[in-house]
Image (cartoon, rainbow, N blue to C red):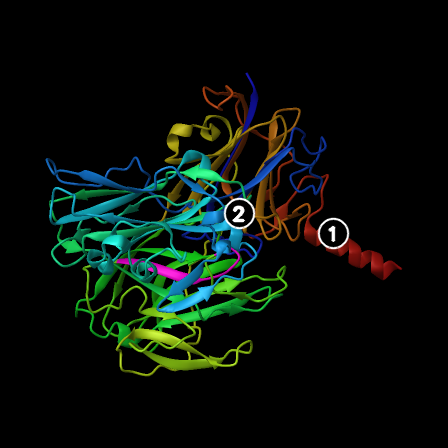
Amino acid sequence: MPSWKALKFSRHYDTCSAEDVPIPEATTRLIYASSENNPPEGSSSTTSSIPYHTRRGSVSVQLRSNVPTQDDVPPVPPDTPLYHMDFRVNNITVSTSTSLGSGSSIFVLGQDFTSTSTDAEKTSYYCKTFSLETLDVSTFHAVQFNPIIEPGNKKKVHHILLYECPGLAYDSASANYEGRCWGDEAPSSVKNCNFGKVIAGWAIGGGPIMMPEVAGMRFGNGIHNKYALMEIHYDNYDGADFVDSSGLRMLYTPTLRQHDVGVLSTGALAGLHIPAGEESYSVNARCPSGCTSSVRSDGVTIFSSFLHAHTSATSIHAALLDGSGTFKESLGAEPFYDFNFQQAIALNATVMPGDQLHVKCTFNTQHRTKATRFGLATDDEMCLTYLWYYPYDSSLPNSNGCIFTNFDLSTYETVDIRPDPYADDLLPIALCENAGFDLASPSEPGKMIEDKICKSTFQDEQPMFLEGAEAAFDRTLYSFSKELEDGFKIFWNFNEDDQVLDLAALAQTDGWVGIGFGRGAMAGSDVVIGWLDEDGGYHFSDRFAVANDVPVVDSEISYFNIAVMAGQCNENGENCVWEDAIKSDLISTVLMSGGTTSSPTSSPPMVLLALLLMTLLLK
């Protein structure tokens, strides 16, 4: 049987150390690696010598969220009927003829845009309309939307949106339309429906949208009409034609729940202009108090948010502010945003009358030679947050009601917010429909996320290193797992009360195994590495990667419940027989005072500094 290594440990979400990377509530960008070789025999865990990896990769994962899957069935009372309807395309061919590069203009909020993206010929937006009148029930609650992604197209189906389309009910051509969303052949009512009222959405890497037990999205009875438009964005990155039948599955019940669900979106679209060569360029957009002034007196509850931008975005934060602009709570944060991994974020936030919604997106355009503007191609940009809430409140603006734009709308109150140095005119903001109020330039709030209480490992009475039966790896003790690639798996648990993550990495290798927390690349990652020496003793090294080079050893270890062990498993890493974990005599330990005690073959940082000073004084 093949040889496998297991590296397990626990850590606090935020360790108080500048040498560690906090684990966010949303996406964690992991790097992973292993080698068939170990560091030199006799080396301590503080050695800087690490043999080059023979396997490496990066992956995005939500380590602090119980992300629903298609296998999760919506919670419904016994004997409650549950039906489904599929919104799908049927064996369509995606090619350059369906792309934005084939003469498509983009019609957003009453304005035409023509994409100038170099990726326009690789970007397709395909639309199909659906009638809900064929369903057996006149009024129902949709309680879950599952993605149906063609297995071979998972990297090319970028996102799917389902819109409510009032205009389709009066236009038979539109009500039966299927084709390019923005082509000349698309009826105006189809173009008008895009960027309209969102019903559901999914993006690459994401899972289902699941309504809370007390609420559902109502169709019929004047809340949502009988027609919907599905929009699929294809990112045909290699330019090769392919056939697709992807879409969404709606699970619904005629047994109505207590509340109806609504969707509100806010952010920046057509007003975006991001200069080239910027390492960190932020855009702030705000839905002001006037947009929520008529909300019911007890407020509405936001239960899910979905943060969305394109490939130059590095972070997105959404926040709920009070009427004065003071931070109340986060509405979702992606500090390490990954365009290829977009998951909904579970929330429980209450929007009261007069509250404000603020969205901040940060972009990196260092490697671009021209400015990046709003557009639909993957190298264009947008900055959006979709918010699912209950009870549905008709006083809240439509999903295009709090979106930045760079053109006037007769039915919107607009105000100039700042000169655009790359345009002749000022940049106005579209507010709520017929809001009738003024707004000053939106500035960034004092903070965009809750204050976090960090916790040092030394505040716990937890053992740093485990041995024997206490250290044994048992996959059944972990609630979550993910196969990163053949021969490398991770298992984890999270505890929000204690703010602790327990993680185990399982790799098919004869050498060291490592995991890093960071931004998806070596530079800036918090890295841990484990291996066994010839005597069977295990070593553990806690490091930080300052650059894309061998990571530097931390001044202290911020992890606990550490163990490394070897075993024999089958090709799938199952049916393992593990050897006892034995701590090496050379492994470092960390004292309660924060000082480092190392093996005789290595020198603590303070000792090295003292030796250097003595050498200089003796010269």
Task: Name the quarter where the N terminus is drawn.
Answer: top right
Residue 499 image offset from top left, x and y in percent: 40, 50
- Relative vertical location of residue 70 with respect to residue 362 in this rendering, above or below: above
Residue 277 image offset from top left, x and y in percent: 62, 65
SS of the residue under disc 2: strand
Q: Residues within 10 Å of mark 2 (few under 14, many from 20)?
A: many
Which amino acid, mark 2?
Phe
Q: Is residue 412 left or right of residue 274?
A: left
Q: Residues within 10 Å of mark 1 (few under 14, many from 20)?
A: few
Q: Nearer the viewer, residue 453 or 69?
A: 69
Q: Was residue 557 drawn as part of the magenta stretch in this picture?
A: no
Q: Nearer the viewer, residue 348 or 429?
A: 429
Q: Is residue 423 left or right of residue 205?
A: right
Residue 351 image offset from top left, x and y in percent: 26, 66
Residue 448 occupies quadrant: bottom left
Residue 517's disc is 2
| Residue pictured at 42% horizontal, 29% vertical | 475
- Relative vertical location of residue 355 with respect to residue 481 in this rendering, above or below: below
Residue 593 image offset from top left, x and y in percent: 56, 53
SS of the residue under disc 1: helix
Residue topped by disc 1: 608
Region in magenta: 377-388
Q: Is residue 416 left or right of residue 135?
A: right
| Residue pictured at 58% horizontal, 50% vertical | 525
Residue 50 occupies quadrant: top right
Whether tag 1 and tag 2 are in contact, CB under 8 A, the answer is no
Q: Is residue 10 left or right of residue 409?
A: right
- Relative vertical location of residue 488 with respect to residue 26 in this rendering, above or below: above
